[in-house]
Amino acid sequence: MDATLLVMAAGAGSRFGGLKQIEPIGKNGEVLLDYSVYDAVNAGFSKIVFVIKKEIEKDFRDIIGKRIEKKADVEYAFQSLDDLPNGFSPVKDRVKPWGTVQAVLCAKNCIDTPFAVINSDDYYGKNVYGYLIDHFKNSDEMCMAAYELGNTLSDNGTVTRGVCEVENGYLKSVTEHYNLDKNTDLPLDSKVSMNIWGFRPDIFKKLENGFENFLKNLKNPLKDEYILPVFVDEIIRNENAKIKVLTTKDTWIGMTYREDLPFVKSEMAKKDYNF
């Protein structure tokens, strides 16, 4: 079956101190995203859609896109501040895009298959992409991959995680928890969202409705963002949406801070990849 991987890569990496999406990790200049795409294509994803800022298009294509275009069909979508629904105007002095819901909506014209959403600066492990493909083959339901909290923390600072309540294999709620580190009081086997979701194209209408409602109710127009865990929690509460939880024991590897880089390079060097 055809399936698309949507990669959200428009973040500027302010905490990291640079464009972490294009930071070399592998011995031949591979970036963390190369490993994710390699795993996804091997699992059966046939198309990759990158959501990026227009300003980094040349660097992104040169450093990442040209390699990946040899392995899969690739399209680009662009996230910008002024890409808003009809009736809404850009906010003066705002500098950040509107969050991950807007990022996914930017790609709606590129996608007509079941699709998974991932972050560009997270390594999710090899197994999860196979779980997603199997789910798409066997179910029309939305899904998410859940990781154990202890497998997603950084040694170099705090992180934000969507902590999940799961009931009978389905997501009951997801709540953002901020400033988490390895001394957290939360159980380390708590299930968390790492922004890896499985949707079908009919989700775009729900995303549009949610985004419009968010824009109508801004509290801080300069900083508010509408993120996927909040959207998902809303449709569970308001529409009784069913989101199947695919659990994995894989260890997440990511670059939240520049100090994470040596560990990431070391861990990826241990893995068996033949680009």
Image (cartoon, rainbow, N blue to C red):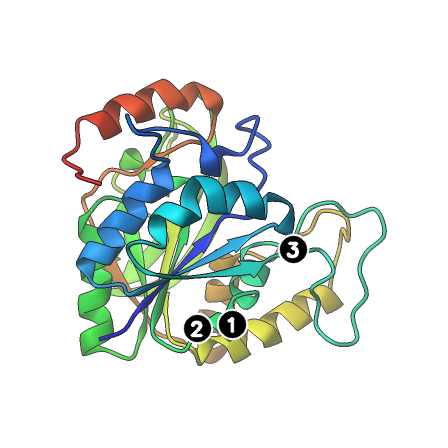
Q: Is residue 135 toward the left or the right of residue 37 in the image?
A: left
Reading the chain from its start, which is encountered first: label 3 or label 1?
3
The numbered disc on residue 111 is 2
Which residue occupies 55% across, 35% down? 13
Q: Is residue 17 toward the left or the right of residue 261 in the image?
A: right
Residue type at tag 3: Trp
- Graded by Cα atoms within 10 Å as few (under 14), some (14 to 19) or many (20 or more), the crowding at tag 2 reads some
| Structural distance between the alpha carbons of marks 1 and 2 | 6 Å
Image quarter where the N terminus lies is bottom left
- Graded by Cα atoms within 10 Å as few (under 14), some (14 to 19) or many (20 or more), the crowding at tag 1 reads some
From the image, state whether disc 2 or disc 3 is nearer to you.
Answer: 2
Q: In this picture, is 96 found above or below 132?
A: above
Reading the chain from its start, which is encountered first: label 2 or label 3?
3
Q: In this picture, is 182 found above or below 137?
A: above
| Structural distance between the alpha carbons of marks 3 and 1 | 16 Å
Which residue occupies 75% across, 76% down? 86
Q: Secondary structure at mark 2?
A: loop
**In front of the other: 171 or 118:** 118
The numbered disc on residue 98 is 3
